[in-house]
Every structure is written in structure tokens, then in C-alpha cells.
Image (spheres, coloured by chain):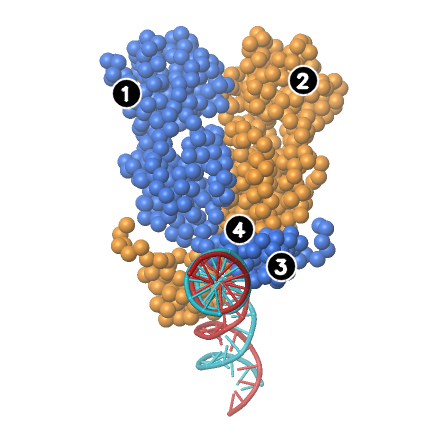
Chain colours: A blue, B orange, C red, D cyan
DNA sequence: GCTTCCAGTGGGAGCGCTCCCAGATCAGGT
DNA sequence: ACCTGATCTGGGAGCGCTCCCACTGGAAGC
């Protein structure tokens, strides 16, 4: 706006020329590498300022073979899973950690076939310095792609079946166990479960935690009533549960959305919460706080999950070898149980 | 994993050599440009397959001066604004549209000073082919940066004050007006407003819509009670409102989170919704459906907002000149009004 | 038969940076 | 004086691609 002429971006050569040094020296000065005299370093800095020089990241990337970007790949058919703030929180954490390492965040939603193709291409063309991978389902085609990739890959949550070399996960089993133990400690003896999709490791692990806790308490686990982590599915699951086990007095739902759905069904069925039926959720998203009654739930450190994934990836990119991480959960008691 | 030797990626030269053609022909074949005989084209394709060749995007970017990526910049101090699914939805829409244009999505959360610096650098170094910019506050430093940038920029929502050349926005005024008119049509005469941050254009526009509607109906607008789009702020604002105007019979909240907060305060104050006080929200996020009672709210097409921003950006990148877009809203009546 | 044209071809010059390496400069030690 | 070894310096060769251009040869036009 201030300059009339829409001048082309100055290059490093022009900076060097203006500073009266060679391109090599200018480059070193810019990356503040050693072997540059104080005088020339300052001359370069001056030239940079005068010319308004900004290095071209693409050229740098080509020369260094480093893109300066990390990708966060979120697999999963329906973008509705993206409707709750879970991934948003992950992104906030990852973004902050990448910022510290001066890496850009590339976000890939691998929902369609085309999206998956592009992710595969990203892997094969080394379009990023590393990848964080989340939302994998059983037999997800991306699992194989990621394993073959000669690129740092950090998993967010473990994929079903295999345990990757590097991952950050939340203690799903422990959290679910704690939630269920809490229901038991309240004196509930007929505790049902609305589990999440059993083709995800989180869904399975949370069911495992529920079962373990009941078994340990000498109670009978009920067969899992499966939902898909959405509010309507929780509501529907609760209805089935109520029909099959009219005498139940506690419900553990594998996430807050489904717990909210369960609350709705219970309200409509005239069951008081927590007097008749105590309900515990999982996630501690906003919905847990605004639900009526506010949900007792298992808090998981979602932002930390994103942050740690990114940190682990950065470590990997720097050539070190981090160890997998399992983040703790914490029971938050509100009014629903 | 299958190959023992960790071979370097094959280059276009190697493909050309294997196919018995020059690099130029190979390049043309790859980009299926004209002036390549059928035979050679096939030879190149075969070589590509045999070698498992994948073009190096960085090298291509350097040569074409196109990065193949578009950035979505979300300005704003607190990442808590990211806690509701709003931006997640925008991302889903933008991602889908960019996928069609074969562009990658770069996500920049410009929360800290450092983050803002990086965005500025992105602009100045042309680190992306174009930028979508959202979440601008009054006097946001990024506004200036964006205006000076010699790069396609599409705004999501208009910044306070200036109206940029290209933007996609939601009809905030119209939506707020419709919501308020609806309250009036219900016979409510003392309609209060919990407005959003007035340093955002959305906050101001929604307040304007409220005021216009009341004035048009010959009623007195109440002074705006400001919240910051979060549930607690809505709850607090409602408490103040109740204290100052105990006789109010309707509330328009500038978003669903605040409406949910208002609902909570009203419940605690013993006011029946909608019998005593009718409440209308804005956004139609998940929280509107799970609130008790379910919220009557103004639905805005968030995914479409993201999609249209991306489409507009792609148009711009292709050298055409699109016109700004204002997306319609729609009142969704549930039980709260 | 001769131009005229154009699809097809490959050489080569970039794109803007990093980095190796050979040479220069200047200490200090003997 | 000389040599050794450190600190500087700039030339030049890439990184892997695109694209301009000059060239070929065969089909078409007269």
C-alpha cells in the first residue's frame, strides 16, 4: 500500500549484494550460524531490513529437505465426530506445541476416499516432516500407509489391535474403571454400560474398564449396549437398556454426548437422576457442564493429548527416540452421580 | 518394511531415463500436458509405477511459485473460543472445498504474539497460496497485515469497521431480527438481550438486529447486557438482567452457549421457560439440542461458511474475482420459546 | 515440388535457498 | 622467520521440478 511499485520479493542474492557480502555469508548470518564476522553480520541485518527481505520457505525446504510443517491427520468417515469439541481441543494443544518448534500445522481430514488418497500421497511424497494420526478405526487403510512411511508418525490413541512404536493415549481403561468403581461405591449394584463404537480402541478400552471394575466388585457386568458417541445414540441405547433391565440403578456412558442422551431418555421415562439412576459420562466436554443435571464424568486432558503428540513428534523429527505416553484421567463429580 | 534397502526417492530424471525419454517429456506426461505421444506417455506411466515415483511437492512449489496450500487463520487470544464446535464445523467445510481443489489446509491459531508473528511471516513469505481469516477483533493487528499482503485473502465474517474486498459472512443482523421478532410475535413485550462481545462484528450485528426488531415493533430495547459468548458469561448476564428488570418475559442471547447459561440462571431463579421467560439463542450448536428445555435458536450454516470461504479463495487463486457472500440464517423453534 | 504448420522432443536455464570445500586471513607458538 | 590451526569468506554445485525455446519430421496446403 505504501510502495507504488509492486516489486518482486528480494532474494538472498540481493541482500548479499546490498550488504557487500557473498550469498554464503548472508545465508549464515540469517540462520545465525557461526563463521560470520560481526561487521558482516550487521551489514546483512541492515540489508535485510532495508529490503524487507523474507526468506522463501519453499526454497529453503527444497535445499534442506525439511518442509517445516507437521500434519495432523484425522481419519473417520463422518465429520460429525468433529462436531464435538474434542478434536478442536487436540488442535489447540498440538498447535501450541508446534508453534514452539516453529512448525506449521497441516490439517488433513481423511474422510472420503479422495481425502485418504491425499494423505497417502502426503506420506509418500514426504509433504510434511512428520505426522500425527488420530481417529483410526479397525482395519483403517491409513494404518498400513503410516507404518510403511519413512517419516516420523505419532499416533493419538492406539489403533485397534496393533500398538504402534510411538503414541500418546489417554488412560481409557483406568478412567472407565474409576467411573464404574464410583458408581459401585455409591451402592449401585445394577450398573449398565453404554459403550462407544467397539471398532475403536477407546470404545473397547472403556468397556474393558467398566467390566473389570464390576468383576472386581463381584457384580455382574451387563452386556454392552453400543452407541456411536453421539447424543441420539446414547438416548436410544438408554431406551433399550431400560426395556431390558428395568431395575438398573447406574449407567456408565463411554462419553458425555451419549450420557446426555441417556439423561434425556431417563427424564422422559420419569426416572430421577441420580436418585433412581446414577449416570457417569466420559470426556468432560462442555456438554457435561450444561447437562441437566450436570454430569459426573471422567475428565481427560485433551489439550495435553494434542500437546504431547506434537512434542513427541518434534522429538522424533529431531532424531531422538521418545517413549509412548499414557495420560491420566480424573473423575469429576457433579450431580448426576 | 518390505524393501530392505532404504532407497532414496526416485526423481523425475530417473523416471525419464527409465522410460527412455527426456525429463521434459516425463514432466509433461505427469501433468498430462499436451505434446506427448501416446507411446511415451505410457512409457512414463510404466516407469512411474515401477519406480514408485511420487513427485516432490516442494520442488514443484519452488518452480511454479505455488505452494499448493491454503491457510485458515483464526485470530483470538483465548483458545477457549475454540472450545465450542463452531470452528470445527468451519474447518470441515473448508477442508472439503479445498480437497476438491487439491489444496492442503494449513491451520494457524494466532493466539499469542508469537503466533501472530508467524502468521505475518506466512503472509510476507507467501507461505501459502491464499489465506482465510477469521475471528478478527476490533483493531486486530492482523487486519493490517492482511490488507498489505499481496496474496488472496478471504475474510470469514467482516472485521469490525472495515468491509474487506472479499468475505463470506452470515446474516447476523437478519438472524437476530428474526429471533427477536419471533419473541415479539409470541406476545413478549419486555425482551432483553444478552449480546456477545461488542468488539466483534458478529456481536454488534446481532445486537443491531435485536434493536431494529424491537424498534420496528414499537417496543423499547433494553440496554445490551454483554457476555463473551461463553456459558458462564450468559449465566452471569442473566442474573444481572433479572436483577435490573425483574419483569422481563423474553431474552435473546447472541449465542447458544450464553443462552444455555441464561437457562441455568432462570432455572435457579425459579422462572419457568418458556412460560415465564422465553429464550432464543443463536448458532444452533449441539448445546441447543441438549439444553433443557431444548433451545429455540437461529441456525447458521457454519459448514457452508467454511466451504464458501474456501471456494471463494480458490476462485481468487485462479485469478478470478468473486463477489462477497452473505449466508442466510433460519429460525429453529424448539421448546425454549 | 515447395513452403507452412504444428505435434513431439530434449536441452538448458532457472526457482531461491543450503552447504561443502578450497582458499584467504590472522592469530599465536616455536 | 616459519608452521599450525583457528576463524572467515565466496564460489559453485546441488535440491527436484517447470517451462521456454530451438529443433525435428511428417502432414497438409498451394
Crowd rating for badge 3 (residues with CA inside 10 Å; few <14, some 14–19, many 20+): many
Q: Camera-side residue: C15 or A279?
A: C15
Whichever of callouts 3 and 1 sits on the residue coming sooner in the sequence is 3
The residue tagged 2 is: B192
Q: Camera-side residue: B104 or A30?
A: A30
Snapshot quadrant of residue A138: top left
Check the residue under mark 1 and report the chain it is in: A
Determine the secondary structure under disc 1: helix
Determine the secondary structure under disc 2: strand
Give me the residue at 60% from left, 45% from top: B120
Horizontal arrangement in the rendering, residue A37 relative to residue A109 (left or right) = right
Check the residue under mark 3 and report the chain it is in: A
Q: Position of residue A59 (x, y in %)?
A: 51, 56
Q: Position of residue D17 (x, y in %)?
A: 46, 61
Crowd rating for badge 4 (residues with CA inside 10 Å; few <14, some 14–19, many 20+): few
The residue tagged 4 is: A32
Q: Position of residue A81 (x, y in %)?
A: 43, 32
Give me the residue at 59% from left, 32% from top: B77
Snapshot quadrant of residue A216: top left
The residue tagged 3 is: A19
In 3D space, how far apart are the residues under numbered discs 4 and 2 (Cα atoms)? Answer: 59 Å
Whichever of callouts 4 and 1 sits on the residue coming sooner in the sequence is 4
Check the residue under mark 4 and report the chain it is in: A
Q: Are marks 4 and 1 on the same chain?
A: yes
Check the residue under mark 2 and report the chain it is in: B
Q: Are marks 1 and 2 on the same chain?
A: no
Q: Are marks 3 and 2 on the same chain?
A: no
Q: Camera-side residue: A129 or B220?
A: A129
The residue tagged 1 is: A211
Determine the secondary structure under disc 4: loop
In 3D space, how far apart are the residues under numbered discs 3 and 1 (Cα atoms)? Answer: 71 Å
Amino acid at each position: 500500500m505504501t510502495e507504488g511499485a509492486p516489486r518482486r520479493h528480494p532474494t538472498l542474492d540481493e541482500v548479499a549484494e546490498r550488504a557487500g557480502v557473498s550469498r554464503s555469508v548472508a545465508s549464515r548470518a540469517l540462520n545465525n550460524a557461526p563463521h560470520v564476522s560481526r561487521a558482516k553480520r550487521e551489514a546483512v541485518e541492515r540489508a535485510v531490513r532495508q529490503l524487507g527481505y523474507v526468506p522463501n520457505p519453499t526454497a529453503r525446504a527444497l535445499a534442506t529437505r525439511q518442509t517445516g510443517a507437521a500434519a495432523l491427520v484425522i481419519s473417520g468417515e463422518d465429520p460429525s465426530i468433529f462436531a464435538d469439541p474434542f478434536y478442536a481441543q487436540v488442535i489447540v494443544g498440538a498447535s501450541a506445541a508446534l508453534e514452539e518448534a516453529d512448525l506449521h500445522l497441516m490439517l488433513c481430514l481423511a474422510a472420503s476416499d479422495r481425502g485418504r488418497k491425499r494423505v497417502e500421497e502426503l506420506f509418500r511424497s514426504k509433504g510434511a516432516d512428520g505426522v500425527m494420526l488420530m481417529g483410526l478405526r479397525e482395519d483403517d487403510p491409513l494404518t498400513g500407509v503410516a507404518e510403511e512411511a519413512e517419516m516420523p508418525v505419532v499416533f493419538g490413541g492406539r489403533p485397534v489391535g496393533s500398538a504402534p512404536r510411538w503414541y500418546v493415549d489417554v488412560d481409557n481403561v483406568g478412567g472407565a474403571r474409576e467411573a464404574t468403581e464410583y458408581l459401585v461405591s455409591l451402592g449401585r449394584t445394577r450398573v449398565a454400560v453404554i459403550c462407544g463404537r467397539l471398532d475403536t480402541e477407546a470404545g473397547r478400552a472403556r468397556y474393558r474398564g467398566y467390566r473389570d471394575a464390576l468383576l472386581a466388585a463381584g457384580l455382574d457386568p451387563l452386556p454392552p449396549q453400543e452407541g456411536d458417541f453421539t447424543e441420539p445414540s446414547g438416548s436410544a441405547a438408554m431406551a433399550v437398556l431400560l426395556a431390558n433391565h428395568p431395575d438398573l440403578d447406574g449407567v456408565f456412558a463411554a462419553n458425555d454426548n451419549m450420557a446426555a442422551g441417556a439423561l434425556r431418555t431417563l427424564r422422559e421415562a420419569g426416572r430421577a437422576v441420580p436418585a433412581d439412576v446414577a449416570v457417569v459420562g466420559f470426556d468432560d466436554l462442555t456438554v457435561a457442564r450444561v447437562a441437566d443435571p450436570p454430569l459426573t464424568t471422567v475428565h481427560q486432558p485433551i489439550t495435553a493429548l494434542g500437546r504431547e503428540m506434537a512434542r513427541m513428534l518434534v522429538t522424533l523429527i529431531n532424531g531422538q527416540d521418545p517413549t509412548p505416553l499414557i495420560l491420566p484421567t480424573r473423575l469429576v463429580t457433579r450431580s448426576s452421580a
